[in-house]
Each structure stands twice: as structure tokens, then as C-alpha cells.
Image (spheres, rainbow, N blue to C red):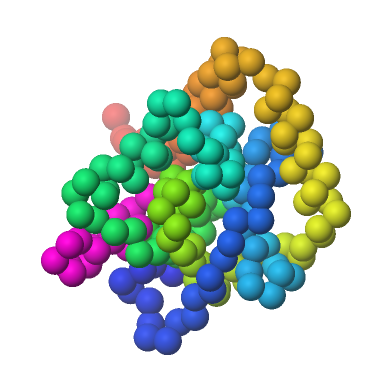
Amino acid sequence: MAIIGQRAPGQAVVEMRVAGIALDAASRSPIVLLRDPSGRRQVPIWIDQAQAQNIMAGLKQEQSPRPLSHDLMASLMAAGGLTLERVIIHTIESATFRAVLKLRNAGGEASELDARPSDAIALALRTGSSIWMLEEVVADASIPVDAEADAEDAADFRRFLDGISPAELVRNVNKARSEAEQADLDSEDDQEPEEEDTPG
């Protein structure tokens, strides 16, 4: 498992760009696609609908009448003298990606914060920061690029957003969150050791 701060010197990282948002054909869940510089490999990361809308807003550089959460994060960072230098997606474990924000304050001191990849990507798009991924993660999780299929998926996702009401979006997000929480509970139950029978 590759973790920032524990990786060996010289371990390769790859700068990625957001190629777009697609829809999983089976689950109808949004996927953010990160593509490498060669344009031949891309890494799909499954996200929820609210995260997808935040990333789409960042891609389009849309200005909301009231700031979205990631707009507020970017403003708070600027007010506090923090600069987001880059985002690094460094681990994939049990189909879950992990990322860190590499920050620097006005005095030049560097720091890092753990973040969900979806939040890190949305924030990077708003601050013009680069997105990097460990090569071993790209190698493990990437799929070949199919530009025609990607364009069709992106159009499908835009049609999906156009046809959903705000209330329905909130219901779907809450449902996805509840299902994720239940899956976490089920996983914890599976990991609990069974009690041994003791002699009476």
C-alpha cells in the first residue's frame, strides 16, 4: 500500500487531468475520470451526485449566486494565507482511493491534509492546482481510454442532471449516504471475532 510520507525515494508520480464525468451504466452512479498525459490511460473514481455537480461546476468555472462548499473552502484558504500546491491521490485500498492536499502558508511552511479524492479534485479545479497520482495507483486502477464511449457517457450524465429536480437529488444523495454507512457497519460486523465456547 502506497502512502505519502512513507514512499521510497524516486517513486514515480503522474500528473493527471480531469477528463470529465460519466455515468456507471449499471448503477447510474457518477464517475470522475482522471486521464494521464499520454491520453491512453484513465482512472475512474466512483462518486455521488453532489460530488459530481461540485466537480462539474469547477470544470466549467461556474460562479454560483451563493458559494458552494468548495468555493467557500478556497476562499477560507486564501483568507488564511494558505496555497494549495497540489493534490496527490496516493492509495487505493478495497476500491477506495485516498488523497492528500499539499499546502503551504504565507511563511513558506508546508503541510498536508487527508482528503477524499472528490473533495480534493473539486478544490484543485477551483484553485488551479495540479492533480497527481502515484504511478502504482495508476497502473492498478487505470483502464484504456475509449474517447467515443466517454463522450456518450458524459452526454448521458448531462441529460441525467437536466432531468432531475433538486429535491430528488437530495433524496438520492441521502440514500447513497445511508447505503454507504450501512455497508461500513456490515463490514465492521464481518470483522468482529466470534466468541469461543467456554466450558461450563
The answer to whether residue 48 shows anywhere in this view is no
Name the residue at the right extreme.
148
Q: Is residue 112 above or below residue 166?
A: below
Name the residue at the top extreme.
167
Number of numbered markers? 0
| In magenta stretch: residue 107 | yes
Could you tell me residue 136's position as x and y percent?
55, 73
Could you tell me residue 191's position as x and y percent?
43, 42
Image quadrant where one finds the C terminus: top left
Q: Is residue 128 above or below residue 133?
A: above
**Residue 75 lies in quadrant:** top left
Q: Residue at x 18, y 69 (%)?
A: 108
Could you tell me residue 60's position as x and y percent?
58, 44
Q: Is residue 193 left or right of residue 34?
A: left
Q: Is residue 41 above or below residue 124?
A: below
- Magenta residue span: 101-117
Q: Is residue 32 left or right of residue 100?
A: right
